[in-house]
Amino acid sequence: MKKLIVTVAAAAISFGAAFADTAQEGKKQPRRLTPEIKAMLMARTGGTVVKRAEGPEFAFVNAQKRVATEAMKKVPEELEKVLNFPFSMRDGEIKACSIAEAPGFLNFKTAAVILIVDDAKIPTTTLTALEGKWGIVNVAALAADNPGADKLASRVRKEMWRTFAVLMGASNNQRYGCLMKSVHSLSDLDGLPYETVSPDPFPHICRTMDRLGMKRNVSATYRKAFIEGWAPPPETEMQRKIVAEETARMEAEKKAGGK
């Protein structure tokens, strides 16, 4: 439960301001970190590092050519940052039928999957199979009115978020600007000002991901990660200093313990 609270709090900090219904004028603002405090914390901790969870991940698979993978990868990156679960974006191929082949992308390393396809035979912008743990975002339907490249990419990103939320049990939210408001046309989709879901359903989404067997990523300061033995090689002078300090401390403790 503590991990869930931390995850949701982080998500709210990242996204809550964008979805505020009204500005709270006159309210005392929280104290912000000054550059001096940030520098002191960085020197003491070495910054934050993340160890990706072992086990199944949530996969987005790009099986079309009209929208580049580069234009879509921010969706799994944002999801991993705010939910603290492992996500991936990779290329794939549909040989004949998107719907029939979608379940084949699930395996022991993939808890659920969303395919991005360009299939004129599918008349809708998205499809979801809750019991099958897969979804489809259909670029062909999203490009029906021949939008420009940037607008089409934005539509795809929005539907990636929307399809993910539906698969995770968060199918509707009437908060202003949230992607999970009712959408009945491409113009409705274009009219949504944000490309992300509001934080409201995140706790339920996290519980669903728990039930799928997904594990949370581990975040820690570089110093703590080094002490625990899983820190990556140091990249900054501060991290190299921490490695030297902690190595010397461990050696001193080992010698003291041997006396």
Image: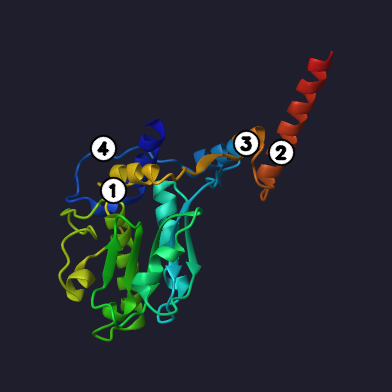
The CA span between labels 2 and 1 is 37 Å
Q: Give 60 or 84, whichever is nearer the viewer.
A: 60
Real-space CA distance between mark 4 and mark 2, rounded to the nearest whole angstrom: 40 Å
In the figure, residue 73 lies in which quadrant?
A: bottom left
Q: Residue at x 84, y 13 (%)?
A: 259
Disc 1 to disc 3, how far (Cα)? Answer: 31 Å
Label 4 environment density (alpha carbons within 10 Å; few <14, some 14–19, many ≥20): few
- Within 10 Å of disc 1 (Cα), the crowding (few <14, some 14-19, many 20+) is many
Tell which tag, 1 or 4, sits nearer the viewer: 1
Element assignment for label 4 = loop
Marks 2 and 3, the one that precedes in the sequence = 3
Tag 3: amino acid: Arg
Q: Earlier in the sequence, mark 4 or mark 3?
A: 4
Of callouts 2 and 1, the N-terminal one: 1
Reading the image, the residue beneath label 3 is 223
Dot 3 crowding, Cα within 10 Å, few <14, some 14–19, many 20+: many
Q: Amino acid at mark 2?
A: Val
Q: Amino acid at mark 1?
A: Pro
Q: Is residue 11 above or below residue 226?
A: below
Q: Which mark is residue 243?
A: 2
Provide the residue designation for mark 4.
28
Q: Secondary structure at mark 3?
A: helix
Question: Extreme top residue here?
Answer: 259
Task: Give the SS element for disc 2.
Answer: helix
Q: Nearer the viewer, mark 2 or mark 1?
A: 1
Tell me the residue at 40%/82% (across/down): 66
Closer to viewer: mark 4 or mark 2? 2
Indicate left or right for 230 with 149 as reference. right
Q: Quadrant of residue 203?
A: top left
Residue 199 shows which numbered tag?
Answer: 1
Point out residue 37 in the picture as x, y percentages from the top left corner: 50, 38
